[in-house]
Image (tube, helix red, strand yellow):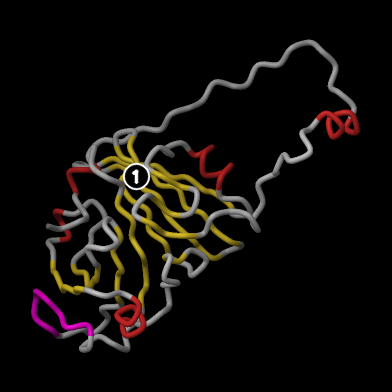
Amino acid sequence: MRWLVVAALCVGCKSKKAPPKFDDAPPAPADAAVADAPADAATPDAATMPLTITPDGVGPITAKHIDEDDYKELLVGLTIKSEHREGEDFRFDEYVASKGTTPVLRAVISDRSLFKIEVMDPMFTTVAGIGVGMTAEELAAKTPGLKCVYETYDPNQDAERVDRALHCGTEKLPRVRFEIDHDKFKGPEGKVNPKVIAKRKIVQIVWLAPEE
């Protein structure tokens, strides 16, 4: 069953959190704040941020994270930009996390639910160390039971105008799909032997949120 479901993108909206409340007490001196902090308190930073893609999510991002502020707080060291996309038959929001000018991941929010995360940079990898840029041959070597398929679609029926896809996956890593470079691929639709596409590279790793 095709993972990119247009119907899931039909309705989307962006929420706004109420501004934080402040009392009239003067701010505590900086040294006092440090003195009052627990000795074992950890400040989130890029060095400690989870970077693993699992069936539960991508790094620190899971299905419960649907607001832009979540991404700004959890994706330490990355710049977050949001955009609302809407057409005649679709509506969704997207958050793109970048490292400098390089996109790292893209999250799609539909109907106040996280629909998917597309990983576009090797910063995030699976437990087995599979990341964007690796070849299908390397993917197969690290992924027992890997199955690949080539599919074509009607772009006019797709919210993101996707017309084809060459992707691989395994039952041992549910909700995770490895998108393979399909440029000039001439094979027929259907199952594809990983050996046929061995030298082609992973261009995206897509995590799909569990259906509610």
Q: Quadrant of the C terminus?
A: top left
State yes or no: residue 164 in magenta.
no
Q: Quadrant of the N terminus?
A: bottom left
Nearer to us in this view, 74 or 92:
74
Q: Which residues are magenta?
A: 187-194
The residue that disc 1 covers is: 85
Neighbor class of circle 1 (other Cα within 10 Å; few <14, some 14-19, many 20+) is some
Where disc 1 sits, the SS reads strand
Please report the residue visible at 57 percent of the width from the left and 64 percent of the height from the top. 101
Res 30 → quadrant: top right
Q: Main secondary structure of the magenta part?
A: loop
Question: In the picture shown, does residue 185 fall above or below 82?
Answer: below
Nearer to us in this view, 18 or 47:
47
Question: In the picture shown, does residue 17 fall above or below 167?
Answer: above
Res 184 → quadrant: bottom left
Residue type at mark 1? Arg
Question: In the picture shown, does residue 3 fall above or below 138?
Answer: above
Question: In the picture shown, does residue 124 fall above or below 195?
Answer: above
Res 151 → quadrant: bottom left
State yes or no: residue 190 in magenta.
yes
Expressed as whole percent of the image width and height from the top left, the position of residue 67 reads 46, 36
Expressed as whole percent of the image width and height from the top left, the position of residue 24 reads 79, 10
